[in-house]
Amino acid sequence: TWQIESLIEQQVTAIRARVGNSRVICGLSGGVDSSVVAALLYKAIGSQLSCIFVDNGLLRKGECEKVRERFQNHFKTDLHVVDASHRFLSELAGVVDPQQKRKIIGRVFIEVFRKEAESITDARFLAQGTLYPDVIESGGSPDGPAATIKYHHNVGGLPEQLGFELIEPLRDLFKDEVRRMGLALGLSEELIWRHPFPGPGLGVRCLGGITSERLHALREADAIVLEELRKAGLYRTIQQAFAVILPVQSVGVMGDGRTYEETIAVRAVTTDDFMTADWYPLPYDLMRIISTRIINEVRGVNRVVYDISSKPPSTIEWE
Ligand code: XMP
């Protein structure tokens, strides 16, 4: 840990020297990398940091509250939460093509983020959680399309467009170092070990048309999956797990009546690098609990199925 402590000290010194009295904006995604960047910047420059978190309406249950808790209550940053969920949902209405969804979500994100960033008039820098593997993946050129990958996934390409100078304090680090740094900075284990969550969020897990009703069902089902995995002590054995709402309705019975309702698929995979992945054999008893809870607790869902496909040839996400 002394190595991590000294790494933090080095970064803090470097950030202070570079930033001087200027203001820095940090976009938060709710994930590990951007949270570590923000915590590091907060340590280095405190009140000169402004954080922006865009609520796109495609977040998991409780995500927005957790970000507030972390960066408003714990670290007292100047946090700007932008509730753009209506904007996103109205632009996504009727769109079913996965790439189209990603494009819309990416475009609207940039528009919303830009507007908020421009409202912070004295900002000169924009901080981003690029890691060493991101740099390598994009060809290793330090200023090249550093963020072709991140462009789709995160905020990349944006700083230049907005005329900010870029700060990337995690650029030389691997994920495990970022995790240790985050813990040393006082971020919770829960956050540090969080499964990855894609930028387009529940948007690419809501197959078919995206509506607030379907998103609500998906969000509730997803929360049940994660809660039960944690209870069973399997959350960290599995690298990624989630619920998907399928574009399939099926017949069921409830009381004397016939239902025709939504289907939830449950996905859980183990993987070293997310390039290949194996489906994880959840214990039957756990599947039973998850299925029963989803069907009993989530309105509009009458069927739960389990995804037993590995990557390749499947992907981890369904879209
Ligand atoms: P796939 O589905 O390609 O996913 O096997 C591999 C990993 O990448 C994540 N993923 C994304 N992350 N924006 C992101 O930020 C995206 O558009 C996106 N698509 C997939 C996925 O969750 C998994 O961890």
Image (spheres, rainbow, N blue to C red):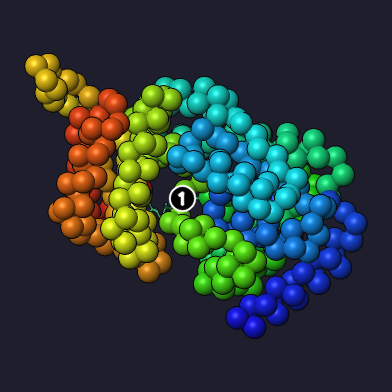
Q: Is residue 240 left or right of residue 109?
A: left
Q: Eyeballing the image, is 11 above or below 63?
A: below
Q: Is mark 1 within 8 Å of ligand 1?
A: yes
Tell me where residue 70 appears, x and y as whole percent.
62, 51
Tell me the quarter of the image containing the N terminus. bottom right
Q: Quadrant of residue 293?
A: top left
Picture quarter with the C terminus: top left
- At horizontal 68% and vertical 46% (from top left) the residue drawn is 72
Q: Residue 142, can we see it?
A: yes
**Is residue 13 toward the left or the right of residue 302 in the image?**
right
The one nearer the camera, 153 or 226, is 226
Helix, strand or loop at mark 1 = loop
Q: Is residue 153 above or below residue 202?
A: below
Q: Is residue 103 left or right of residue 227?
A: right
Q: Which residue extends farthest bottom?
A: 2
Q: Pointer 1: what residue?
A: 197
Q: Nearer the viewer, residue 75 or 55?
A: 75
Which residue appears at 28% of the width and 32% of the height? 297
Locate residue 168, reporting x and y percent: 70, 62
With respect to residue 111, does 28 lie above or below?
Answer: below
* Category of crowding for the residue at label 1, using alpha-carbon neighbours closer than 10 angstroms: few (below 14), some (14–19), many (at least 20): some
Residue at the image position 47 percent from the left and 48 percent from the top? 198
Q: Residue furthest right?
A: 21
Give the camera-side residue of 157 and 303.
303
Residue 173, position as x, y percentages in the image? 60, 72
Q: Residue 309 at x, y = what percent?
A: 22, 54
